[in-house]
Image (tube, helix red, strand yellow):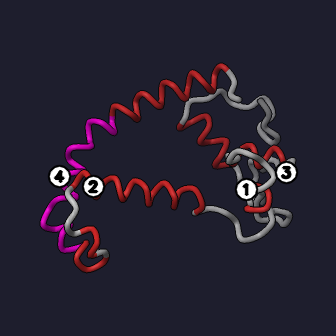
Amino acid sequence: RTTANQGATLRVKGAIAQNLSIAAEGKVKEFLSSEEMNEVFQRCCPLMVPLNGEERLAVLHTLVMGSELVHNFPSVDGTGNFFKDLTIKLAMEYPWFLNEWQALLILNGTTGSKDAKNTSNRVYVDAEVSIYGCKAFAKEQHPTW
């Protein structure tokens, strides 16, 4: 569940992103169909060579979605000093895919502090406010909704 502010922010940012994506799609397909990309695909992925730009985009989209899902799973269980994040073990405990904030809250994590010794999760707070435009958390060190 999201708060009203998060929902509104996601809708606005989502609409902007969707419009930018639609505007760029033709150029991306054209680039993926180019002779330059044919040469690249010939060297790395010959199965892509007979595909047109639209088909190549669909394949790449599928690969990126899978990679994005698992690229940042930590190789540790989150109990050390490195960071608290989603692990395969934690993911298996829930019927949906937890996002990083949900994992952080479930693990009773904190976002770190502003001092240089403990800033590992500060980037999440900065992203929520600066990039996504959400309201700042009332208690930055231990975010809740």
Residue under numbered circle 1: 86
Residue under numbered circle 4: 30
Chain-order first, disc 2 or disc 4? 4
Mark 1 neighbour density, 10 Å: few (under 14) some (14–19) many (20 or more):
many
Residue under numbered circle 3: 107
Asked which quadrant contains residue 142, the reply is top right
Residue under numbered circle 2: 55
Q: Is residue 3 left or right of residue 89?
A: left
Q: Nearer the viewer, mark 2 or mark 1?
A: 2
Q: Position of residue 24 (x, y in %)?
A: 26, 42
Q: Residue at x 74, y 61 (%)?
A: 87
Real-space Cα distance between discs 4 and 3?
45 Å
Give the answer, above or below, for where 78 lies relative to 101.
Answer: below
Q: Residue 111 shows which numbered tag?
A: none
Chain-order first, disc 4 or disc 1? 4
Real-space Cα distance between discs 4 and 1?
37 Å
Q: Main secondary structure of the magenta part?
A: helix
Real-space Cα distance between discs 3 and 1?
9 Å
Q: Is residue 38 magenta?
A: yes
